[in-house]
């Protein structure tokens, strides 16, 4: 029997911000799988993609924001889920300049506050990495800081993943942003002995050096590309995503207890 979804009773339910070491490392995949896993546990999840670039009229239905909204079964207005959507596939500041628009953090925060009043948890997916410029003076880490959210960092499990992950973790710590976990994702199939050794080395060293829980690596899953919904359900049931869900719930419940 399906459990009724739990809604928060306090006036300031928490959220989690999912950021990454780079663009294209799997933020939307991880966020979506986490939403599925937490929803299956009866948690009422809201979703948000505050800024998205590279979205044309013909691709709006497949945008990250639209995908997250469908995965969550959300009926929240797209103006709250994705306040800023731009056509050009470049950094948000450049995309906004091209369309002669200004990204206002106050607009993003208003949308976030509206969502968190309606849901127990809000999963907020960032754009690019933490230092991607949003305005001429603010970057993604400023949004995380002003939302007062802990972060999940998504990075790659292969060669180059160590430096990118440690730089991102260092940047978040400098802003005193709590870090829930580092999630490592296989961006491509690991088919050769050399690639396996590289991945094992990356994962092993990050478990020693990251200073936060390291989840994964998430296996490369071509089924997600072929059938997004079916692939997500399968990914949501894997041990790494279940572990990530437990870390999220521990962080959320711990914060609520401290407030109480």
Image (tube, rainbow, N blue to C red):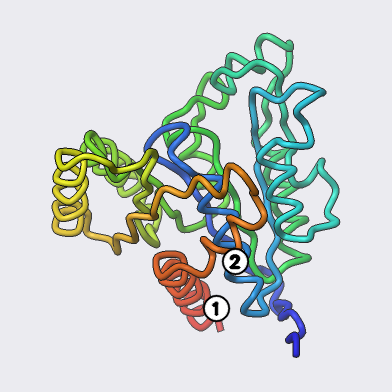
Which quadrant would residue 47 be assigned to in this image? bottom right
Q: Is residue 147 above or below residue 105?
A: below
Work out how far the residue at label 1 is from the one at label 2, CA to CA, in angstroms: 8 Å
Q: Nearer the viewer, residue 12 or 205?
A: 205
Do tag 1 and tag 2 residues touch (Cβ < 8 Å)? yes
Which quadrant of the figure contains the N terminus? bottom right
Left or right, residue 212 beside residue 197: right
Which quadrant would residue 251 be assigned to in this image? bottom left
x and y, in percent, of residue 34 in the image: 55, 62
Q: Nearer the viewer, residue 71 or 223?
A: 223
x and y, in percent, of residue 71 in the image: 70, 56
Q: How many other residues sit within 10 Å of disc 1, few (<14), some (14-19) or many (≥20)?
A: some
Kindly identify the residue that appears in the image at 85 percent across and 48 percent down.
77
Q: Which mark is residue 256?
A: 1
x and y, in percent, of residue 40 in the image: 64, 75
- Closer to the chain start, of discs 1 and 2, is 2
x and y, in percent, of residue 242 in the image: 46, 71
Direction bottom: furthest residue: 1
Q: What secondary structure is marked by label 1? A: helix
Q: How many other residues sit within 10 Å of disc 2, few (<14), some (14-19) or many (≥20)?
A: many
Kindly identify the residue that appears in the image at 43 percent across and 37 percent down.
130
Q: Is residue 161 above or below residue 104?
A: below
Q: Nearer the viewer, residue 31 or 250?
A: 31
Q: Which mark is residue 70?
A: none
Kindly identify the residue that appears in the image at 82 percent across and 23 percent down.
57
Q: Is residue 122 above or below residue 163?
A: below
Q: Which mark is residue 14?
A: 2
Kindly identify the residue that appears in the image at 67 percent across and 49 percent down.
48
Left or right, residue 208 beside residue 186: left
Left or right, residue 83 beside residue 242: right
Q: Nearer the viewer, residue 99 or 89?
A: 89
Which quadrant of the figure contains the C terminus? bottom right
């Amino acid at each position: 029997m399906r459990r009724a979804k739990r809604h928060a009773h306090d006036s300031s339910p928490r959220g989690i911000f999912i950021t990454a070491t780079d663009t294209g490392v799997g933020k939307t995949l991880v966020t979506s799988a986490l939403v599925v896993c937490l929803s299956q546990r009866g948690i009422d999840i809201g979703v948000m993609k505050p800024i998205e670039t590279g979205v044309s009229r013909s691709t709006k239905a497949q945008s990250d924001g639209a995908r997250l909204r469908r995965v969550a079964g959300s009926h929240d207005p797209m103006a709250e889920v994705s306040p800023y959507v731009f056509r050009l596939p470049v950094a948000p500041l450049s995309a906004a300049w091209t369309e002669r628009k200004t990204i206002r953090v106050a607009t993003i925060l208003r949308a976030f506050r509206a969502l968190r009043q309606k849901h127990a948890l809000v999963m907020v997916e960032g754009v690019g990495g933490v230092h991607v410029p949003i305005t001429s003076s603010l970057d993604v880490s400023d949004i995380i800081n002003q939302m007062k959210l802990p972060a999940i960092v998504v990075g790659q499990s292969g060669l180059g993943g160590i430096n990118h992950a440690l730089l991102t973790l260092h940047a978040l710590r400098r802003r005193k942003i709590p870090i829930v976990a580092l999630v490592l994702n296989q961006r491509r199939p690991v088919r050769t002995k050399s690639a396996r050794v590289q991945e094992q080395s990356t994962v092993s060293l990050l478990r020693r050096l990251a200073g936060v829980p390291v989840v994964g690596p998430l296996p490369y899953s071509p089924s997600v590309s072929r059938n997004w919904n079916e692939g997500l359900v399968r990914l949501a049931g894997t041990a790494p995503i279940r572990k990530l869900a437990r870390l999220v719930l521990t962080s959320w419940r711990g914060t609520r207890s401290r407030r109480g």
